Image: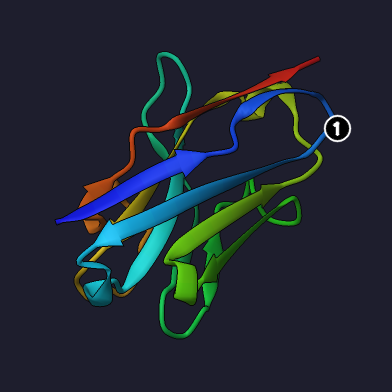
Amino acid sequence: QVQLVESGGGLVQAGGSLRLSCAASGRTFSTYSMGWFRQAPGKEREFVAAIRWSAGSTDYADSAKGRFTISRDNAKNTVYLQMNSLAPEDTAVYYCASAHYYRGAYRSTRDYNYWGQGTQVTVSS
């Protein structure tokens, strides 16, 4: 089992920044990738960013490119999402997830095995 705990959400004005953190515990040694997803009210959960745990290579949704940065601290088993230039359409509950099997890509919710409880991000205009 793996436990994921997100933090860092909150209320920010448009154009502002937030940094989300996700601390993993448990059987983290089998992690292949960690990702961030978000879900706005009435919408499906969507991919934001992912990072391969060993290589550190990253992948971003088009909506996140150039504004968001995913990073990880292997020693702390923590993944971060730095979000800059936030806009009201970024308002959502943000979830981190961990994947424990090899995949070609990690953009689908089906690629992930464990999920955090989510943290609310609200961007006011």
- Measured as percent of width and height from the top left, residue 61 is found at 55, 52
* Residue under the point 34% across and 33% down: 117
Q: Quadrant of residue 16?
A: top right
- Measured as percent of width and height from the top left, residue 62 is found at 61, 51
- Amino acid at circle 1: Gly
Front-most of 15 and 78? 78
Q: Secondary structure at mark 1?
A: loop
* Residue under the point 47% across and 35% down: 38
- Measured as percent of width and height from the top left, residue 101 is found at 19, 71
Front-most of 54 and 57? 54
- Left or right: 22, with 89 as reference point: left
Residue projecting furthest to the bottom: 55
Q: Quadrant of residue 26?
A: bottom left
Q: How is the image coloured?
A: rainbow
Question: Up-down: is 64 above or below 99?
Answer: above
Q: Which residue is mark 1?
A: 15
Front-most of 95 and 48? 95
Question: Up-down: is 62 above or below 91?
Answer: below
- Left or right: 2, with 125 as reference point: left
Question: Up-down: is 115 above or below 104?
Answer: above
